[in-house]
Image: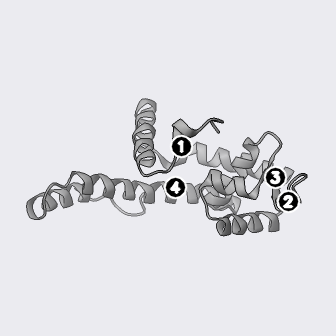
Amino acid sequence: MASREPLPFDPILRAAELWDERIGPARTMAAVTSVMRVQQILLSAVDGALRPHGLTFARYEALVLLTFARTGRLPMRVIGERLQLHPTSVTNIVDRLQADGLVRRAPHPTDRRATLVEITEAGSALQENATKSVTAIDFGLTGLTPDEETQLTALLGRVRRAAGDFDERADRRHA
């Protein structure tokens, strides 16, 4: 994963020691810096696994989301909501996927203002192969047991919920 030799010490813990000495309690700084570094590690791993398939993570997520839909198609608005993306970003992602023949746009049958995005056979096949690649590397998340992965997801979920990312009490559909 690392393209260089590992450091002989943890630079985040060293920074936390200095922070404690010179600024004050370093607990939050160390946690946030660790999350940011792990994000870089995971993005690098996932990007590396998806690159041979000609996909970015955002484009891959859109294909996966469409395969999760019962009909293989969703309105653009729903794609944006589920992926938590701005409408402009969704349009750019769908434009690229459509140019590659992985999705197609279709008019919504009951809402003239809405456009449906439907995954193609080529898109389904590519999503399946790309999924094999990212799952083969565990999405880059190494060093944790399955129970620790579950704990990590729960802890990060608490941070996301506190930041207003979602409100599970308001989720009547559950997806």
* Residue at mark 3 to residue at mark 1: CA–CA distance: 25 Å
Q: Mark 1 sits on what residue?
A: 138
- The crowd level at tag 1 (other Cα within 10 Å; few <14, some 14-19, many 20+) is few
In this figure, which residue is indicated by the disc labeled 2? 104
User: Which residue is at the far top?
Assistant: 147
Q: Mark 2 vs mark 3: which is more N-terminal?
A: 2
Q: Residues within 10 Å of mark 4 (few under 14, many from 20)?
A: some
Q: Which residue is mark 3?
A: 119
Residue 101 visible in rendering: yes
Percent across and percent down for residue 21 are 8, 60
Residue located at (66% from left, 44% from top): 132
Q: Are marks 2 and 4 in contact (CB under 8 Å)?
A: no
Amino acid type, mark 3:
Ile
Mark 2 Cα shell of 10 Å, populated few (<14), some (14-19), many (≥20): some
Q: Position of residue 40 (x, y in %)?
A: 44, 60
Callout 4 touching callout 1 (CB < 8 Å):
no
Which comes before the other along the chain, label 4 or label 1?
Answer: 4
Task: Residue at 42% x, 52% y: name it.
Answer: 163
Q: Which residue is mark 4?
A: 45
